[in-house]
Image: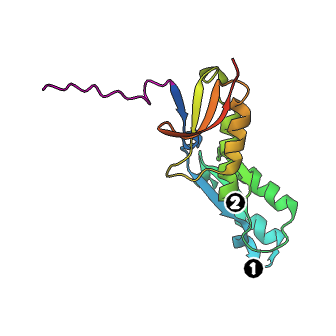
């Protein structure tokens, strides 16, 4: 008896578009700049010393990088110090952001989601990928849902072979 079996990939023929939020993260390096290294005795920022440190610093190391400005210890840092650091980095950095590494990544992802071309997803069945090597913030999932919800035919979460349906537009 000759049994012929045709294997059909139902996922590829389903018309689903898989959206991996990690793909929206910038490829450029992200650096955290901790202001604590400028604190005198780890507690106070002295203006004269701070300005001298900044004058002698090689800011070109931030060329085409995203920079998160932060202070990892509990200290009172005057607003002008962050402003001065931003002015020093701005000619080199792709963007200067106030916050830690995780906040910077979330900010960059949110910005990328705002710039999604909706026409690619209009009236399509979209699966927002749920697993991967890169941790994605819950805020990014909320943002992409708000962005795509009004235009997609259906929105799902997970993997194309195993999805959680979230929304289906009524015909």
In the image, is residue 37 above or below residue 161?
below
- Which residue position holds label 1? 42
Name the one closer to the observer, 149 or 53.
149
Quadrant holding the C terminus: top right
Q: Residues within 10 Å of mark 2 (few under 14, many from 20)?
A: some
- Which residue position holds label 2? 100
Instruction: Tell me which segment is drawn in magenta.
Output: 1-15
Residue beneath the point at 50% across and 49% down = 132
Quadrant holding the N terminus: top left
Q: Position of residue 59 (x, y in %)?
A: 64, 55
Is residue 2 inside the magenta stretch? yes
Labels 1 and 2: the sequence-earlier one = 1
The CA span between labels 1 and 2 is: 19 Å
Q: Position of residue 135 (x, y in %)?
A: 58, 53
Name the one closer to the observer, 129 or 37.
129
Q: Residues within 10 Å of mark 1 (few under 14, many from 20)?
A: few
Residue beneath the point at 77% across and 64% down = 51
Viewer-side label of 1, 2: 2
Is residue 119 inside the magenta stretch? no
In the image, is residue 109 above or below residue 49?
above
In the image, is residue 78 above or below residue 113?
below
Residue 25's image quarter? top right
Is residue 91 visible to us here?
no
- Is 90 placed left or right of 120 in the picture? right
Is residue 36 visible to us here?
yes
In the image, is residue 43 above or below residue 148?
below
Residue beneath the point at 75% across and 52% down = 86
Q: Position of residue 143 (x, y in %)?
A: 72, 40
**View extreme (bottom): residue:** 41
Name the one closer to the observer, 10 or 61.
10
């Amino acid at each position: 008896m000759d049994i012929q079996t045709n294997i059909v990939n139902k996922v590829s023929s389903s018309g689903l578009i898989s959206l991996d939020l990690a793909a929206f993260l910038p490829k450029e390096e992200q650096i955290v700049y901790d202001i604590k290294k400028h604190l005198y005795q780890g507690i106070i920022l002295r203006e004269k010393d701070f300005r001298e440190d900044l004058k002698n610093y090689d800011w070109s190391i931030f060329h085409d990088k995203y920079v998160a400005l932060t202070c990892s210890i509990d200290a009172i840092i005057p607003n002008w110090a962050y402003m001065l650091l931003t002015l020093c980095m701005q000619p080199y950095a792709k963007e200067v952001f106030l916050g830690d590494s995780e906040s910077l990544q979330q900010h960059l992802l949110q910005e990328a989601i705002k710039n999604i071309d909706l026409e690619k997803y209009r009236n399509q069945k979209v699966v927002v990928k749920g697993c991967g090597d890169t941790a994605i913030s819950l805020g990014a999932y909320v943002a992409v849902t708000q962005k795509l919800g009004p235009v997609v035919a259906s929105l799902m979460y997970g993997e194309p072979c195993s999805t959680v349906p979230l929304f289906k537009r009524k015909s």
